[in-house]
Image: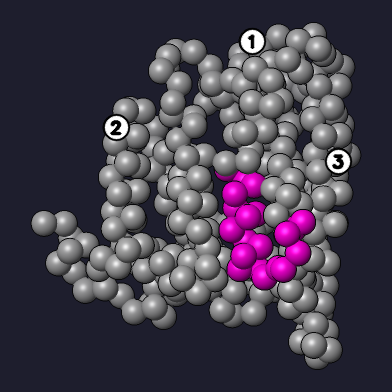
Amino acid sequence: MSTAAISAEPSIEQAYAQCRAIAKREAKNFYYAFVALPEPRRNAICAIYAYMRRADDLADDESLSRDERMRQLDGWRTEWHAVSRGAETSDPVFVATRDAIQRFRIPLTLLDELVAGTTMDLEHTATDHPDTYATFDDLYRYCYLVASVVGLVCIRIFGYSDPRAEKLAEETGIAFQLTNILRDVAEDAARNRVYLPLEDLAAHNVALDSLLHRKGGTPPNADERALLADIAARAEKYYQSAKALLPLIDRESRPALWVLVRIYHRLLICIRRANYDVFSHRQSVPTFMKLEILAVGMMRMGWARLTK
């Protein structure tokens, strides 16, 4: 019998407290936006984040083989399905996530897609071969599963009534994930992963090996900068969808989305201002700048409450 079956189920308050702690410790850019949400919505977002974080951690545990990680993820997902149908559990993340999806009517299929995104990197059978994507369409599918689905979950918590919000949320997720991919090129290459589409590498005369086996800290050459600038231009196009999404969600949730978009877009600007040197050091938005953005977001939240 599993520990979940014999241990007491935590209260909703205890479960959400655990998820808030996980989000505060791990979420970095996301957490600044969470703070700008009213408490019930903030709790739900933290629960979804903690659920997603757990799936990512299982998928990324490189002390285990890919097959073992897939087995653990399958078992974790089976347990979650049982909990989502009402089975008792001692897992506070499951307790909070179940409450969130019921409270905000989040389809279970979206959470399954979140997990599917985390397993894509595990589906390559040749472990001595780098993980790559041939075309931008292939990469878009990956970005959809790991980021757009998050956006589709979030807007259900934020609240919306106009169906146009769903496509805009999808494209906002693409903007965020392309920004992450640009920031993490060196880190991903060290893990034998290149998310920049192979067709784009070829178009810019960039060899795959130049990303996988470069000397640490070597800045990009002209061709590599042009490649990264091309990906940044695509991300910039999708950030226009984020601007269009903002007025379509519930007024009291808009400051949180504004904070999140502002921080991620600022990261893209930092990468651009560094002339796309994502190899010498990891680009990030300074904490003081995040706090400035959050302060404006909190003022917007206060104004939304006063004028609703």
**Marking on residue 191:** none
Task: State which tag comes first along the sequence, 3 or 1.
Answer: 1
Residue 101 rendering spot, x and y as whole percentages: 48, 66
Task: Residue type at mark 3: give it.
Answer: Lys
Query: Mark 3 or mark 1: which is in front?
Result: 3
Residue matched to label 2: 68
Secondary element at image label 3: helix
- By secondary structure, the bulk of the magenta-drawn segment is best described as helix
Distance between the Cα atoms at labels 2 and 1?
29 Å
Secondary element at image label 2: helix
For the residue pair 211 and 241, the one nearer the viewer reads as 241
Residue matched to label 1: 209
- What are the residue bounds of the magenta stretch? 146-165
Residue at 84% x, 27% y: name it: 230
Corner quadrant of residue 41: bottom right
Residue 225 visible somewhere in the drawing: no
Residue 77 rendering spot, x and y as whole percentages: 35, 48
Residue 37 rendering spot, x and y as whole percentages: 66, 74
Task: Residue type at mark 2: give it.
Answer: Glu
Q: Is residue 143 above or below residue 105?
A: above
Do labels 2 and 1 touch, CB within 8 Å? no
Query: Mark 3 or mark 2: which is in front?
Result: 3
Residue matched to label 3: 237
Residue at 82% x, 13% y: name it: 204
Residue at 71% x, 9% y: name it: 207
